[in-house]
Image (cartoon, helix red, strand yellow):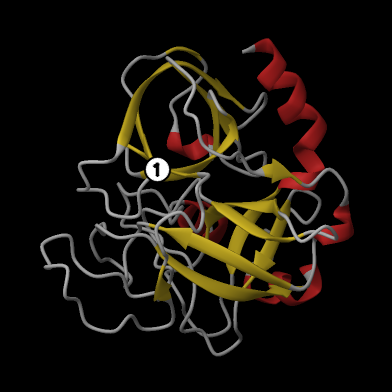
Amino acid sequence: MKKNIVRALQRCAAAGAVVLAAISLQPTSSSAATPPVVGGTRAAQGEFPFMVRLSMGCGGALYTKQIVLTAAHCVSGSGNNTSITATAGVVDLQSSSAIKVKSTKVLQAPGYNGTGKDWALIKLAKPIDLPTLKIADTKAYDNGTFTVAGWGAAREGGGQQRYLLKAQVPFVSDAGCKQAYPELVAGEEICAGFQQGGVDTCQGDSGGPMFRKDNNNAWIQVGIVSWGEGCARPDYPGVYTEVSTFASAIKSAAARL
């Protein structure tokens, strides 16, 4: 029973938004002169050029210049789909410089049923000429300190934000994460967060990337924002799709698109 309740708290905008979890993002109605961010900082223009905002209220990252990697729970299935708008190239969603491109197709992870396998690909109508984010294809980077970024809620139950925020969260072992979430699918999910809470992703951050630097000092994606108990609560880390587990399937799916 608890599993169904927790999974309902997946970090899509419809449920709330991913609180860079507590990366308190400012309300969309705020002016450019905003108060300090709690638990995180505003990303600089061009800092994470691969970040994408999706119109259904999720995040994503450019896997290729024409394909966005996001969460399976952000989409309603596979097939032709022209209803999604991807916004890229800006940290301010209201910027006149924003690049907006419609979707053409969606591929949801085969076998996705609400538990694990939380990844999906969205093909765009045309390429976006921005840097892409490579994905980890080994578990070598599934540790250390990760960066998360998104336009999700700045507090549990809060609204979507106008400006992209960023924060860092430490890896949490499967054993440690299972203390909070016995239902964790350890082979398909990876956890990150502080024991004391305060920094996390939240509703609206779903589908966005969790990433770190690789051995060549380049960004590499290790996770996809998936779900969690509330946002930034003590002893409840964020749960992310473990990208390395699905790297081969993602590559094959992208080729089919």
- Going by the image, does 107 lie left or right of 154? right
Q: Residue at x 40, y 44 (%)?
A: 58
Let me know if residue 55 appears in the view: no
Query: Percent position (x, y) of residue 202?
Result: 41, 63
Q: Position of residue 229 (x, y in %)?
A: 48, 68
Q: Position of residue 226 (x, y in %)?
A: 54, 52
From the image, tell me which residue sits under label 1: 89
Assign the C terminus to one quadrant of the image.
top right
The image shows residue 246 at horizontal and vertical percentages of 76, 37
Counting every numbered tag in the picture gives: 1
What's under tag 1, amino acid-wise?
A: Gly
Residue ID at (61%, 57%): 210
Give the left or right position of residue 143, taking residue 71 as reference: right
Where 148 sits versus 46, above or below?
A: below
Camera-side residue: 51 or 197? 51
Dividing the picture into quadrants, the one containing residue 252 is top right
Depicted 12 relative to depicted 255: above or below: below
Residue occupying image coordinates x 51% and y 73%: 167
Q: Which residue is drawn at 53% across and 23% down?
A: 66
Residue 257 appears in view? yes
